[in-house]
Each structure stands twice: as structure tokens, then as C-alpha cells.
Image: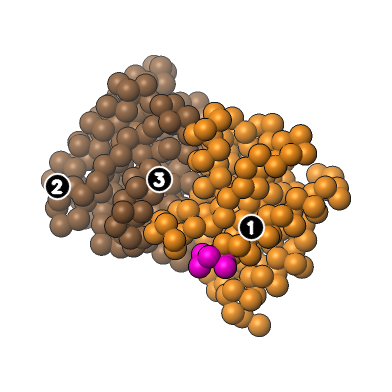
Chain colours: A brown, B orange
Amino acid sequence: MTLTAKDEKFMRIAIEKAEKAMEKGNEPFGAILVKDDEIVSSCENQIFTKNDPTFHAELGLIKEFCSANGGDLSEYTMYTSCEPCCMCSGAMVWSKLGRVVYSLNHEELAEIAGFNIMIGSDEIFASSPFKPSVGKQVLSEESRVLYEDYFGNE
Amino acid sequence: MTLTAKDEKFMRIAIEKAEKAMEKGNEPFGAILVKDDEIVSSCENQIFTKNDPTFHAELGLIKEFCSANGGDLSEYTMYTSCEPCCMCSGAMVWSKLGRVVYSLNHEELAEIAGFNIMIGSDEIFASSPFKPSVGKQVLSEESRVLYEDYFGNE
């Protein structure tokens, strides 16, 4: 997939959301939803403040946006500060998300954090009836600093 | 994992929840959460009535129960009318669910429904830092009838 300067611009905003999440006591993950170059929704990780271990940025955004606007995201792009886990990748499939662009990939996150569910989003999408197009590792040198800072590895 | 008569009793209730979901215009999936032989929560699929394609019975239950009671389900068993998809399996991992018992498996569902995300819960759990113990195909001859009825294949 061709990546553009706009993708970097939107990813920077998703990373800012991740920083906000961390400032509020949650894990540093953030996501935004874009249609026709406009941000239509955003969400931060809220697993600790909501006592809900499934409140990842991506799933939270999809639930909230679809509940209000209908369940078909085929004309939308999601920017997320890290590759989606199998839960959030599944949510992208079920909502027919058109395109997802992520920053750090899940193997790098696992290396930094020390754990993850070791199934990548490519594997989920390859096995699925709907597949978003995928842009990878946009601004990953910037997001990596955030994850290293939070998870405390050097 | 050893299955007992209690597992059949609780599964029958999960299947009844699936039937209720269908009666309300949603897909026929239901789940209950049990601790010390008591049902502490239940949830039906609500993807159509809530306009939310991620509102599967298992994920809906986990979100609701954890938000109210805290995010660690390691002492709980979930009974679900069908093997969880990758999204709901991921939610089980992140909430550290202790045990999951399902009825129809996801390959049978795919055959009946004509589509699915073709990654089984075993594959997700095998790649995960937390793994529930798993009971399979409890009352699957009963749940199969429900799915054949709903998805309309013979």
C-alpha cells in the first residue's frame, strides 16, 4: 500500500492520543478514524480507568463509532499507534474496516513489553472474509520511544 | 479437561440465551459466566439491535462484567454456545479467564454459516501469555440445530 505524508500526519495524532492515555494512567495506545481526510473519531486505551481489560483504543473506537453511526467501516481508515492484537484485528474484520495504518509492529511491542498474543494482524486478516488494506510501521521510531518509556526496557 | 453433568446444565442455559438473542433479531449466540456453581452474569449477541458488529455474547459479557467487578476472570468459567472467534478469544486472554466451555466449534459454524475468521481459539490461546482451560463441543448436537435453523443451510 502506498503511504503518503498525510499518513504521517494522522499517525502523529494517533501517537499523541497514546501519550494522553499514558498521562491518564492507562497503557499508551491511541487510535483515530479518518474519512475523506477528516478525523471522525478517536479513542485512547482505557483498560485501567474503566476496569476493562478489553478497552483497547481500536476496539473502543469501533464499538463507540459503530453504535452511533452504523456497523460498516469500509470507507474509513484507522490509524493506530501499534499493530492491533487479535481481539482488535477481529473487531476490524467484523466492522469491515477499509484500511488500517499502524506504527510499531506487534513483534517489536512483544520484545519491548515482554509479552503479547503472538498472532499478527496479517495472520488474522489472511484468514478472514473481509480484509482491510494495511499500512505498516509509520513513524515507528517515534512510537518505539513511547513504548520503551512506558514498559521500562532499555 | 474433564467435563461433568454440571457443564451440560450450564451449557443448556447458554444455548437458551442464544435462542433469546435470535428471537430479539440478533445472531444466535449466548454466553454465561459461572463461579462456584453460580451464574454471575450472562450476555446475548446484540450486533444488530446495538448497531455494533463487535457485540458478540462473549466480548459483551467480559466488558460488562469486568467494568463492574474488575478485570481478572481467572476464577470464572464461561459457557458459550459456539467456539469464540479471534476477537472474543483475545478478550478471554486479556481478562485472564480461567476456563471456557463451548458447544459448536468454529469450523462447523463456518461450514453452516458459509464464512468465519478461520483461526480457532486453540491457536489464539497457544500463542498467548494467559490460557484458559478449554472444554469443547458440549451439547453440540443441540446447538448445531439452532445454527442450521438460523443460517438456513440444510
Query: Going by the image, does A41 lie left or right of A38?
Result: right
In terms of secondary structure, where does tag 2 sit?
Answer: helix
Q: Chain of mark 3?
A: A
In terms of secondary structure, where does tag 3 sit?
Answer: helix
Residue type pointed to by label 2: Lys
Residue density around tag 1, few if under 14, some if 14–19, many if 20 or more, within 10 Å? many
Judge whether residue A57 can be spotted in this image: yes
* Badges 1 and 2, same chain: no
Where does residue B150 sit, x and y in percent of width and height? 59, 74
Q: Is residue A64 above or below residue B117?
A: above
Query: Going by the image, does B15 lie left or right of A105?
Result: right
Identify the image quadrant of the C terminus of chain A.
top left
Residue at point 39%, 59% (across, down) = B51
Residue density around tag 2, few if under 14, some if 14–19, many if 20 or more, within 10 Å? few
Q: Which residue is mark 3?
A: A59
- Mark closer to the observer (1, 3): 1
Q: Which residue is mark 1?
A: B17
Q: Is residue A3 above or below residue B142?
A: above
Identify the image quadrant of the N terminus of chain A.
bottom left
Q: Which residue is mark 2?
A: A6
- Asked if the residue under mark 3 is in contact with the one under mark 1, i.e. CB atoms within 8 Å, the reply is no
Alpha-carbon distance for marks 1 and 3?
A: 24 Å
Judge whether residue B77 can be spotted in this image: no
Q: Chain of mark 1?
A: B
* Badges 1 and 3, same chain: no
In terms of secondary structure, where does tag 1 sit?
Answer: helix
Specify the segment rendered in magenta: B22-27
Q: Indicate whether residue A106 is drawn in magenta.
A: no
